[in-house]
Amino acid sequence: MSTILNLLRDTALYLLQTLQHNAFILALGVCIAGALRVYLDAERMKQWLLNRPALSIPATVAFGAFTPFCACGTMAVVLGMLASSLPWGAIMAFLTSSPLMSPDEFVLISGILGLRFAIALTAASVFIGVGSGYVANLFQKKTSFFADQLRFSSPAKKASPRKVVLTREEMRSAAFVPSVSYRNAASSACCAGAQANTCCATAEVIKPATPFAALIRRLKLDELVETIFEIGFKKILPLFLAFAAVGYLINRFVPASWISAVFGAKNIFAVPIAAIVGLPLYVSGSAAIPLMDSLLQAGVSPGAMLAFMITGPGTSAGVIAGIASILKRRAIAFYLVCLMISAIVLGYLYDVILLLL
C-alpha cells in the first residue's frame, strides 16, 4: 500500500513540475488556438479556395497545417469541401495535413521538444499534403479510382415554385372580398381595450448596452474567453497531464535500454515499427508532447518519433471512424497508404539529415 501511495505522490509531483515548467508555452499555445478558432472565418477561406482552383492544393495544405482543427473539425471542413465539389486533390491535401500540425502545436513542440523538431513536423505535414494532393489529382484525371467514393449524394436542388394559374371563375371569386372597415377592425382586434398589464400593453424599453459591454461583444472577447477555457481546461490540459503521467511511468518502469533497442537509431527497423505502433493509437499532437519528450530522453530516435507523430494523430481509430462516415474504402485506403509511406520515408530522411548536420 505504501508503495502505491509513494508512486502516486511521485507522479503528482512530476506532473506539477512539468506543468510549472511548461505553463507559459502551454498557455500561449491555447490562446493562439482559441484566437484562430474565434476570429478565423473558415467559410470565407473555403469560398476563396473555390474561386481559385489552380491554387487549391497548396492553399488547402496551408489551410490544414496552420489552422487549429481537431479531428471533428477536420471532418466538418472536408464534408463542406465535398459538398462544394472541390477536386479530390484538394480534399486529400487538407485531410492529410490538417491532423499533423497547427499553430498551437508548433508553439508547444518548439518550446518543449525544440524548434528543430517543430520545423521538421511542419515540413512533413506540408510535404505529405502537397504530395498526396497531386497524386490524388492524377488518380482522378487518369483513372476511376475515386469514382463513387462518397457515402452521401450531392444535395438535391430545390424545386422551383410552381406557377399557379387560376380560371376565370376562380379569379372572380378571389376578387370578391368583403370590405372591412378599418375602425371596426381596430375595435375588434385582440389588443382593443387592452389593460396596462396585458401582453398588448406597451413593451418596456430595453436599455442599450454600456459602451464597455458593446466593445466586448464587438471584439468577441466573451466568446474568446469561453473558447480558451474550453480548449485549455476541457481538452488540452487533461490529456497533457495524462500523457505526462504515462511518460513518467514509462521512464520509471521500462528500462531505457529496452526502448533504445526497439526505437533507437541503431535499430534499422525503428522507424517503420514506430509508424506501425502509431496506427491504432489516438495521439493528440499538443497533449502528447510530454510523452514524446520522455520517449526521446529514453533513447527513441528523432526519425522514429517523427514517424510516430505522423501516423498517431492521422490514423487513430477515432479519425478513421470519422473519415469512414464520409468516404468509402478506396479513398480511406489511399489516405492510410499516403500517411504510412510518408511516415517511413520522412522518418528515415530526418535521421539522415540529423547525422549530416
Image (cartoon, helix red, strand yellow):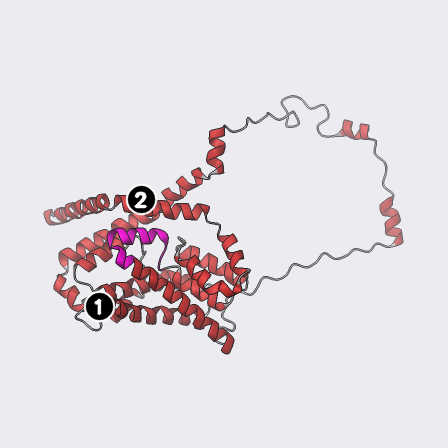
Q: Main secondary structure of the magenta part?
A: helix
Q: Earlier in the sequence, mark 2 or mark 1?
A: 2
Residue range (magenta): 100-118
**Toward the viewer: 291 or 305?**
305
- Dot 1 amino acid type: Leu
Q: Which residue is mark 2?
A: 27
Q: In this image, 79 relative to 249: left or right?
A: right
Circles 2 and 1 in contact, beta carbons < 8 Å: no
Q: Is residue 2 above or below residue 189?
A: below
Residue 201: name its quadrant.
top right
Q: Residue at x 25, y 55 (%)?
A: 114
Is residue 93 shown above or below 189? Answer: below
Q: Is residue 112 found inside the magenta-colored segment of the image? A: yes
Direction bottom: furthest residue: 143
Residue 241's tag is none
Q: Does residue 312 sit above or below 226 in this rendering?
A: below
Q: Is residue 65 magenta?
A: no
Q: Position of residue 147 (x, y in %)?
A: 51, 73
Q: Does residue 143 appear in the picture of this structure?
A: no
Foreground disc of the pair 2, 1: 1
Residue 181 shown left or right of residue 30 in the figure: right
Image quadrant for the C terminus? Answer: bottom left
* Residues at marks 2 and 1, CA–CA distance in whole angstroms: 35 Å
The residue pinned by badge 1 equals 356
Residue sitting at 71 percent across and 30 percent down?
Answer: 190
For label 1, the SS is helix
Q: Tell me where residue 69 sits by quadrant.
A: bottom left
Residue sitting at 37 percent across and 59 percent down?
99
Q: Could you say where residue 287 lies in the image, as x and y percent from the top left?
A: 29, 52
Q: Nearer the viewer, residue 237 or 126?
A: 126
Along the viewing direction, whichever of 227 and 24 lies nearer the viewer = 24
